Amino acid sequence: MKPMKHARTIALTALCLYAGTASAHPGHMAAGFAGGLAHPFLGLDHLLAMIAIGLWAAQQGGRAPWAVPAAFVGAMVLGGGLAWAGLALPQVEAGIAVSVLVLGLLIATRRQWPVTAGMAVAAGFALFHGYAHGLDMPQATSPALYALGFVLATAFFHGVGIAGSLSGRYAMQAAGAAIAASGLAMLVGM
């Protein structure tokens, strides 16, 4: 392994091993587009899940690198809409933590699924992430601008995951194991 690739692997693994408790980050102050854009950057749970979606989708190959993230983004907007409409989604924090754990395990074990199954898994987890984003939307803001912000941030992190897949098979598996460990730590910390 070249020194630069080794340094990237260590940095990615170190980032993934940092695990605070899963939280949907109440108290964000930014409103509108800026608030939606910032929200995914401010929570390790969201960040890891969105990067993991990109990693896992890239690992699947074929149509998955665009179809799985697209399913995640679409269902995330739906989850945000559920929150804005005042509908209840139980166990949001646990769902987010489980998404980090499961996605990490899928990457670490190099689990290959049909694209439609991958899209369904991504969409199911995205409902929880979107709901958390929707709950944290400031009252006096435009839901459309806020959603646009968190959609763009999410797409960015999916792209980071897809780009991270270029680090190689073993680096991806190590990252998946670290992401899974973070998800487990989030669950234990609840």
Image: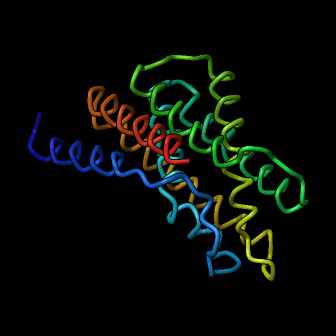
Residue at 56% across, 61% down: 40
State which quarter of the image contains the N terminus: top left
Q: Is residue 41 above or below residue 100?
A: below
Q: Position of residue 73 (x, y in %)?
A: 68, 48
Residue 16 is left or right of residue 111, and the answer is left
Residue 10 is left or right of residue 125, and the answer is left
**Closer to us: 84 or 34:** 84
Residue at 74% across, 76% down: 138
Residue at 34% across, 37% down: 175
Q: Is residue 7 above or below residue 23?
A: above
Q: Position of residue 117 (x, y in %)?
A: 67, 21
Q: Position of residue 172 (x, y in %)?
A: 34, 32
Colour pattern of the rendering: rainbow
Residue 80 is left or right of residue 25, and the answer is right
Q: Position of residue 77 (x, y in %)?
A: 76, 53
Residue at 48% across, 18% down: 111
**Closer to us: 151 or 131:** 131
Q: Is residue 178 above or below residue 108?
A: below
Residue 85 is left or right of residue 189, and the answer is right
Count of all numbered marks drawn on residues in the image: 0
Determine the image quadrant of residue 171.
Answer: top left
